[in-house]
Each structure stands twice: as structure tokens, then as C-alpha cells.
Image (cartoon, grey):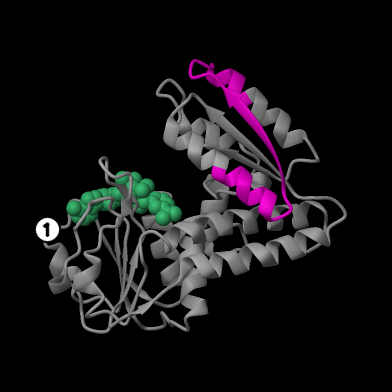
């Protein structure tokens, strides 16, 4: 039976550390969170981030803009926040309404305040290995590996999913730790052939039940990033058939309580880091 990786417990510890560190700074770190439109899921995500800030001793300012907001108006708010010395991190909740160019918005955020680490400059630094903020979900998974003593050195790491926010950066971070990385995606002809080779399997497809027990190498470490919501019960579940896979894996993350809380904790850590850099405390 696999060891359960307790993301919730680890995230609580990280948040407590962030709160302790934040209290030592000359002023509180500050997040500016921008929400465009009234998508209920985005509304919940932003509210949760505000709550996390409160718990971690971080100030948060929220900007609710109507769905019809012009791109120029959003860019001008970002410009104002870029120049505001009291704001350490700027977060624009995605997805944005269709008439707004997401790339233009990401590019407009000052790389120093880009606490989601989506800006091309930060992505480039991550590729070349320069110090920079890391995207929260992959950064949270790397923390889990460290905490549970899971080494990637020389291991075959299979990443299912290649999105800009999860799959791609996750593969890069595993490569950085000397893993041999294989990316799988919708066009991969035989997914099971790839996953069966994995010492470390990270799954972020958003496809419920995609990974079954027969697709796992005995002793593999299995990280389930997905958060699929059951429309009837409202409950979340992953891409991995947990009951089958936990019998073969050495380590496994639950959904919920695995990667999700770590993503939130790493956002708090990124805000703290941005504040420390801005306040010349590191
Ligand atoms: P996305 O839709 O942008 O990307 C999904 C990727 O999976 C694509 O590259 C696609 O090619 C691949 N894919 C989809 N179906 C596949 C299949 N059948 N076989 C092989 N590859 C397949 O999604 P995303 O933003 O990367 O998110 C993925 C999942 O992770 C979603 O369920 C999302 O809710 C979840 N997520 C969770 C967290 C967290 O903190 N836990 C954070 C971000 C995303």
C-alpha cells in the first residue's frame, strides 16, 4: 500500500512559516488580486487566496472589474499596481473574458510582481536555471518530493499534460533535478506504454479515470494534480483511479488534500519572496 502524501499538512506548515517570516519584515507583504467578470469558480479561487493571505499575515487588495472591462482599462490598472511600491504581488485570475488577450495581460505584469510566475521572463529564467519565482503547482509538487525524501536523480519521470501552468513547467523542474522526462499529451498514441515506464508519474490532464492500476509500474510515485468536479455532488476527484493505483504505487497524493493545498501555500510563499526582494531583505 502506498504512502499517502499529505499535502494539506505540509501546506499548513509552509503557511505557518510564511506567517513567521512575514512578521519579521518592516511592513506586511501585499497581494493585489484582480478578478474580471463574475465566474463563480474564479470568485471562489480569489476568495480563498484572500483567506490564505489573512492566515499568513499578508495584506490583500481586491479589484473586481465587470466582465465587459476593456483590455486597455485592465492594462492601465496593472500599470498602476506595477508602480505602487506597497504592492508586492499582482495576480490576475484566469480565465479572462474572451475579448481580453491573456498573453498581453501576463506580459504587462512586472516580472518582479509576477507571483504566478507566468511572465515569459520568469519562464525563461526557469528554463535556464536562474533564480526566479516558480509557478505554484509545480513548485508545490517539488516541495512534496523534498519533504518525503523522493529523489528524481536518474529517475524516469513521466508528465501527463503539457499546459503552460502545470505540465510544461513541472517537466522542466523534474529535469532540473536530473530526472529523465517524458511528456505525454492528447496526441500521445499509447499513453499506457509511457506511464508503465514511470518511476515518477505526474498527471495533470483533467480527464477522470485516465490512469488505471495496470498503467503503473510497481513502486512508482504517483502525483495527481487534477481537480475534476462531480456536477451532482460538487466533490472533487483526480485523474488517477486511486483505489487501484494505491495498491501498486510507493507514494500517492489524494484528491482533495494533495496538490491543491500546496498550490495555495506556494502562492503565499511567492508573495513573501517578492516582498523580501522588494524590501531588500534577501
Ligand atoms: P489543460 O486543459 O490546460 O491541459 C491538459 C493537458 O492534458 C493538455 O496538455 C492535454 O494534451 C493533456 N491531456 C488531456 N487529456 C489527455 C489524455 N486523455 N491523454 C493524455 N493527455 C491528455 O489543463 P491544466 O490547466 O494543466 O490542468 C489540468 C488539471 O489539473 C485540471 O483538472 C485542473 O483543474 C487541475 N489543476 C489543479 C491544480 C491544483 O492546484 N491541484 C492547479 C492547476 C490545475
Seen at 47% across and 80% down, the residue is 148
Seen at 55% across and 48% down, the residue is 116
Q: Is residue 174 visible?
A: yes
* Image position of 100 (left or right of 115): left
How many numbered circles does the render carry? Answer: 1
Circle 1: element type? loop
Point out the residue furthest to the front here.
Answer: 233
- Residue in front for this viewpoint, 127 or 8: 8
Choose top left, top right, bottom left or bottom right for residue 15. bottom right
Vertical comparison of 167 with 77: above or below: below
Seen at 65% across and 41% down, the residue is 110
* Image position of 219 (left or right of 280): left
* Image position of 180 (left or right of 184): right
Q: Is residue 114 highlighted in magenta?
A: no
Residue 175, image x and y in percent?
A: 42, 71
- Residue in front for this viewpoint, 18 or 194: 18
Residue 279, image x and y in percent?
A: 82, 53
- Residue in front for this viewpoint, 178 or 138: 138
Choose top left, top right, bottom left or bottom right for residue 55. bottom right
Other residues around mark 1 within 10 Å, as few (<14) / some (14–19) / many (≥20): few
The residue that label 1 is drawn on is: 189
Vertical comparison of 117 with 80: above or below: below
User: On the rendered image, what quadrant is the C terminus found in?
Assistant: bottom right
- Residue in front for this viewpoint, 72 or 32: 32
Q: Is residue 50 highlighted in magenta?
A: yes
Residue 149, image x and y in percent?
A: 47, 84
Q: Is residue 95 visible?
A: no
Q: Which residues are magenta?
A: 48-75
User: On the rendered image, what quadrant is the N terminus found in?
Assistant: bottom left
Seen at 52% across and 37% down, the residue is 93
Choose top left, top right, bottom left or bottom right for residue 19. bottom right
Residue 22, image x and y in percent?
A: 77, 59
Amino acid at each position: 500500500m502506498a504512502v499517502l502524501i499529505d499535502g494539506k499538512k505540509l501546506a499548513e506548515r509552509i503557511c505557518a512559516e510564511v506567517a513567521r517570516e512575514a512578521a519579521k519584515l518592516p511592513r506586511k507583504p501585499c497581494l493585489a488580486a484582480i478578478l474580471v467578470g463574475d465566474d463563480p469558480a474564479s470568485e471562489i479561487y480569489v476568495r480563498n487566496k484572500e483567506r490564505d493571505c489573512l492566515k499568513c499575515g499578508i495584506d490583500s487588495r481586491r479589484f473586481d472589474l465587470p466582465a465587459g472591462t476593456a483590455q486597455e482599462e485592465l492594462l492601465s490598472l496593472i500599470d498602476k499596481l506595477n508602480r505602487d511600491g506597497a504592492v508586492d504581488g499582482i495576480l490576475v485570475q484566469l480565465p479572462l473574458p474572451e475579448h481580453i488577450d491573456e498573453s498581453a495581460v501576463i506580459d504587462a505584469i512586472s516580472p518582479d510582481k509576477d507571483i504566478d510566475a507566468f511572465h515569459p521572463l520568469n519562464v525563461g529564467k526557469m528554463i535556464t536555471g536562474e533564480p526566479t519565482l516558480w509557478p505554484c503547482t509545480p513548485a508545490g509538487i517539488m516541495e512534496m518530493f523534498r519533504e518525503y525524501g523522493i529523489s528524481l536523480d536518474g529517475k524516469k519521470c513521466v508528465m501527463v499534460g503539457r499546459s503552460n501552468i502545470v505540465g510544461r513547467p513541472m517537466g522542466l523542474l523534474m529535469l532540473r533535478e536530473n530526472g529523465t522526462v517524458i511528456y505525454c499529451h492528447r496526441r500521445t498514441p499509447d499513453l499506457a506504454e509511457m506511464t508503465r515506464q514511470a518511476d515518477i508519474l505526474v498527471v495533470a490532464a483533467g480527464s477522470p479515470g485516465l490512469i488505471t492500476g495496470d498503467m503503473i509500474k510497481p513502486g512508482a510515485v504517483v502525483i495527481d494534480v487534477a481537480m475534476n468536479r462531480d456536477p451532482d455532488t460538487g466533490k472533487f476527484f483526480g485523474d488517477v483511479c486511486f483505489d487501484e493505483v494505491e495498491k501498486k504505487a510507493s507514494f500517492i497524493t489524494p484528491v482533495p488534500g494533495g496538490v491543491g493545498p500546496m498550490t495555495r501555500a506556494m502562492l503565499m510563499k511567492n508573495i513573501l519572496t517578492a516582498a523580501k526582494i522588494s524590501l531588500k531583505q534577501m
